[in-house]
Image (cartoon, rainbow, N blue to C red):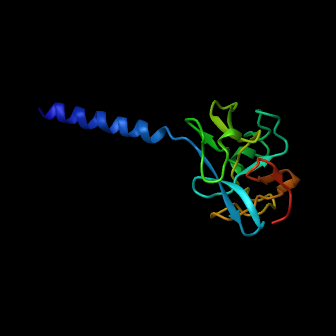
Amino acid sequence: MRRFAVTVVLALSLVGFAAASTSAAVVKVAYNAKLHTKILVDAAGMTLYMYSADYGKVSGCVDDWTYHCIRAWPALVTTGAPKAGAGAKASLLATAKRQDGRTQVMYGGHLLYTWAGAKGLGLPPRDRKPGDVDGQGVIGAWWVLSPAGKPIKKAA
C-alpha cells in the first residue's frame, strides 16, 4: 500500500510539473506613461521590444562570443500557442523557431524580446518593473511596439 501511495504522489507531481512547464506566452497592451502611448507588454507587464536587425522569422540577436545579444535581450518564448491578452490582437500573433530550438513569439511580423541589460557596455540599465522602457532606442535598433504591431521610434 505504501509503495502504491508513493507511486501515485510521484505521478501526480510529474503531471503537475508537466502542466506548469507548458505555458503559453501572453502579449497584452498597457499604457506607458514615459512614452505617453500604449505599447506591448508580456504577462508580467514587462515591456516588449523588436529588433531592427531581425529578418522575418530569423533573429539577428543570438548568443555570439562578442556581444551575447540574447543574454541582454531575452527572447519572448512560448511552449504553446501565444495568447493575446487585453488590447492585443490575436491575428497579429505568430511564432518562429529559433536556432536554439525554442519557439519565439512574434507580433505584427516582429520577433519579441525583453531588455535584461548589458553591464560594462555603457548601455541603459535593464527594465526592472512594469512601465520601464530603458531599452527604447538602444543602439538605434530596439523599439517598443504599438498595439497595431508598428515600431514606436521616439525617445523615452
Residue 133 placement: quadrant: bottom right
- Indicate whether 62 appears above or below 71: above
Front residue of 146 and 110: 146
User: Which quarter of the rendered picture does the N terminus lie within?
Assistant: top left
Q: Residue placed at 67% from the left, 44% from the top?
A: 75
Q: Residue placed at 21% from the left, 35% from the top?
A: 6
Point out residue 17 in the picture as x, y percentages from the top left corner: 40, 39
Considering every residue shown, the one lying at the far bottom of the view is 33
Q: Is residue 123 left or right of residue 76?
A: right
Considering every residue shown, the one lying at the far left of the view is 1
Point out residue 30 in the picture as x, y percentages from the top left corner: 66, 60
Residue 152 placement: quadrant: bottom right
Front residue of 18 and 126: 18
Point out residue 126 in the picture as x, y percentages from the top left corner: 70, 60
Point out residue 76 in the picture as x, y percentages from the top left corner: 65, 44
Q: Is residue 87 left or right of residue 153?
A: left
Considering every residue shown, the one lying at the far right of the view is 140
Q: Is residue 12 left or right of residue 102?
A: left
